[in-house]
Amino acid sequence: MKYRTTGAVLAAVGLAAALTACGSGFNSGGSTQDNTKPLSILIGSSGDAETAAVKSAVADWSKSSGIKATVTVASDLNQQLAQGFSSGKPADVFYLSTDALAGYASNGSLYAYGDKLSNKSDFYPNLVKSFTYDNKLMCAPKDFSTLQLIINTDLWAKAGLTDADIPTTWDQLSAVAKKLTTGSQTGLVIGGEYARVGAFMTEAGGNLMNADSTKATADSEANLKALQYVKDNLTAGDFKYAADVGAGWGGEAFGKQLGAMTIEGNWITGSQSADYPSVNYKVVPLPKGPSGAGTLQFTNCWGIAADSANKSGALSLVEKLTTKSDQLAFAKAFGVMPSIQSAASDWKSEFPKLAPFLDAAAYAQNTPSAKGASDVVSDFNSQVAKLATGDPKAILSSTQKNLEALLSK
């Protein structure tokens, strides 16, 4: 899945930012517009199901519009996007992540079409904020995911736990993690990175940056509480990172039953059904922290290149791909959640056991999206990976300085 290996993605985004910084910008809008020109679509796919679903939806639009459209699956989306922009031949439509947005928006590479969307008011407000740059909605949120607590119900019952023991506070999470830790099995196994540990930061009332990524907020008491909580549980041995149990990510550790619980997004459903179908589990809301409910959200948008020779056709395609019918089809095919509020009840009816993921849309926080923030997050990740023996305050202090330096440029 596209949200598993955050470090690799962020490294690629850093390359994208470097390449786009070398460009001259694409403010002229490209060549003369021709609404019959064929469109190229570049996507990063989680697998065959996503590829087939996107190709089918694009083919349907192409048939009805009469405009030829070709979908290409990138082997390295961020790198190929950067190469396309630096060469002056970008794809017309493409997946674009929040941490890549500012770099492309700042030099005029993107067509800021958000205000032209007929369904603009239907997108979740937090998602709109994710793709707003300089007070403009740059692109339509494609879909999204949030983090929640995943419990192995067989291991839960084996430990003598019932639904009454489902944790709703940090103290309760620590208590059940201790009961579930035995032998090679750890109570909670998560990825050792901001994209997982950051959920605790939001529950404490913090995050690395403020909501619109204009202010560094890493060095806060809230974040210190969160990192100290995670450190204490890592030291106790009741929490572990996936890498420390020989797994590539939390979902793998969970599937192999190296961890009785994990914190992951709704993409875990696909890997569990494909790779670990015998593992029974349930999704429950993350326990509340000192500040209440909190989690992180992850999203992409449908970017349109300012240099596209057929921006009207590209906009028409995006409007079709973000309709209720198409988004629900994508959800069924590869596990994402629709970015529009009008599809919520249908999604919950289709996936009632996954409702906690969508319920979190009301309070989920965005990851940092300031230009260059991905490099700072990568550095934070390298420090958090050693949190068990590290100094939470020092980690946050260095991250604060890095973010402030970034914003001062």
Image (tube, rainbow, N blue to C red):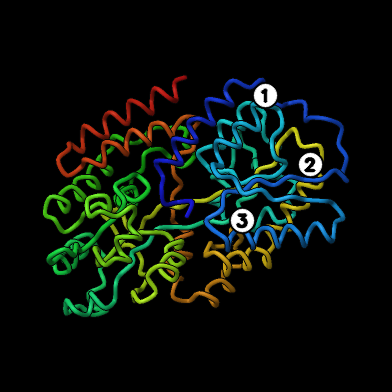
Q: Is residue 395 left or right of residue 115?
A: left
Q: Quadrant of residue 381?
A: top left
- Amino acid beneath label 1: Gly
Mark 2 — residue? 311
What x and y, as percent, mark residue 75? 55, 44
What x and y, as percent, mark residue 80? 59, 37
Q: CA distance from mark 3 to mark 1?
A: 29 Å
Which mark is in front, 3 or 1?
Answer: 1
Say few, some or many: other residues with alpha carbon within 10 Å of mark 1 (under 14 / 14 to 19 / 20 or more): many
**In this orientation, which residue lies closer to the viewer: 146 or 132?**
146
Which of the marked residues, 2 or 3, is nearer the chain's N terminus?
A: 3
**In this orientation, which residue lies closer to the viewer: 175 or 302?**
302
Which of the marked residues, 1 or 2, is nearer the chain's N terminus?
A: 1
Q: Is residue 31 above or below residue 358?
A: above
**In this orientation, which residue lies closer to the viewer: 370 or 59?**
59
Kindly identify which numbered label has been placed on residue 123: 3
Cβ–Cβ under 8 Å for marks 2 and 3: no
Q: Secondary structure at mark 1?
A: loop
- Amino acid beneath label 3: Phe
Q: Is residue 107 above or below residue 222?
A: above
Q: CA distance from mark 1 to mark 2?
A: 17 Å
**Residue found at x 45% / y 69%:** 274
Q: Is residue 160 above or below residue 240?
A: below
Say few, some or many: other residues with alpha carbon within 10 Å of mark 2 (under 14 / 14 to 19 / 20 or more): many
